[in-house]
Image (cartoon, rainbow, N blue to C red):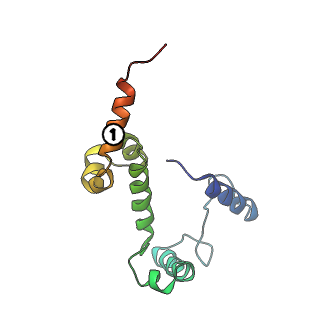
Amino acid sequence: MPIHPELVTLWRHHIKEFNIPAGGRLFVGPRGGIMTDRTHLGAWHKARAAALSEREAASPLAKTPYDLRHAAVSTWLGAGVPPAQVAEWAGHSVAVLLRVYAKCVAGQEEDAKRRISEATRPKTP
């Protein structure tokens, strides 16, 4: 799946700073072992509270880490990435993708018609 270049830069910095070997864990728990769901969610809630306004924090915005995945898939579909490609990146079948995210492709009719028109317009020499 695509990763934003800024995130790649951050991860590379993290790997270098913490001297993470190839195949090593990017993040570890407080005592150096596997990061548990409880540890992960605790960090998530602290980061969310620090990053969001009081009003945003009281809303369902990014309530769980999974919400970011949902937002990414929705953004890709809204940007016009073909559903088959989005499904592959998300690890879904196209049928599941469209059932869960159908509302994300709604409202793209005019853009779709424009693309069809451009693709079928005779080319002038």
Number of on-image labels: 1
Up/down of 94 relative to 101, above or below: above
**Residue furthest front in the image:** 124
Q: Nearer the viewer, residue 91 or 98?
A: 98
Q: Residue at x 40, y 45 (%)?
A: 80
Q: Nearer the viewer, residue 9 or 107?
A: 107
Q: Give the SS element for disc 1.
A: helix
Q: Is residue 48 left or right of residue 60?
A: right
> Which amino acid, mark 1?
Ala
Q: Is residue 114 left or right of residue 16?
A: left
Q: Position of residue 24 (x, y in %)?
A: 63, 58
Badge 1 crowding class, 10 Å Cα cut-off, few under 14, some 14 to 19, many 20 or more, is: few
Q: Is residue 94 left or right of residue 5?
A: left
Mark 1, residue position = 112
- Quadrant housing residue 32: bottom right
Q: Position of residue 23 (x, y in %)?
A: 62, 53
Up/down of 116 relative to 26, above or below: above
Up/down of 98 relative to 67, above or below: above
Q: Residue at x 32, y 43 (%)?
A: 110
Q: Position of residue 29 (x, y in %)?
A: 58, 74
Q: Position of residue 21 (x, y in %)?
A: 69, 56
**Residue furthest top in the image:** 125
